[in-house]
Image (tube, grey):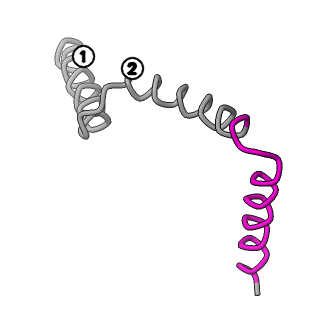
Amino acid sequence: MEKWSDKKQDESEFAYDIIKKKTKDGKNAAAVALGHLGGLKGGIARAKKLSKKKRIEIAMKAAQVRWNKYE
């Protein structure tokens, strides 16, 4: 029968391996979160900057691509 300390060590190693695999790409979680927030703000700022005519052109082009996808 396993001792409690052996089991605890195995769980610790297991948790360490999971974290190691998740952060394998070397990205900083805080930097990723800040980038996400900036991306959310960027779309709104871009929409404000564009003229109404240009926004309509972009929307029409996007709709055309979506509908042509199924043909």
Bin the neighbour count of mark 2 within 10 Å (Cα to Cα): few under 14, some 14-19, many 20 and up: few
- Magenta residues (range): 48-70
Q: Mark 1 points at which residue?
A: 8
Residue 57: in magenta span: yes
- Judged by depth in the image, the label closer to the viewer, 1 or 2, is 2
The quadrant in which the C terminus is found is bottom right
Q: Is residue 59 above or below residue 63?
A: above
Q: Is mark 1 on a helix, strand or loop?
A: helix
Q: Name the residue under label 2.
A: 30
In depth, the one of 12 and 38 nearer the eye is 38
Q: Does the image show residue 20?
A: yes
The quadrant in which the N terminus is found is top left
In depth, the one of 18 and 31 nearer the eye is 31
Three-letter amino acid code at the position of disc 2: Ala
In depth, the one of 1 and 52 nearer the eye is 52
Residue 61: in magenta span: yes
Query: Disc 1 or 2, which lies upstream in sequence?
Result: 1
Residue 48's image quarter?
top right
- Number of numbered markers: 2
Judged left or right of residue 7, residue 38 is right
State whether the magenta stretch is mostly helix, strand or loop: helix
- Alpha carbon of mark 1 to alpha carbon of mark 2: how far? 30 Å
Judged left or right of residue 70, residue 9 is left
Q: In this view, does 45 lie above or below 57?
A: above
Residue occupying the point 82% across, 56% down: 56
Residue occupying the point 65% across, 38% down: 46
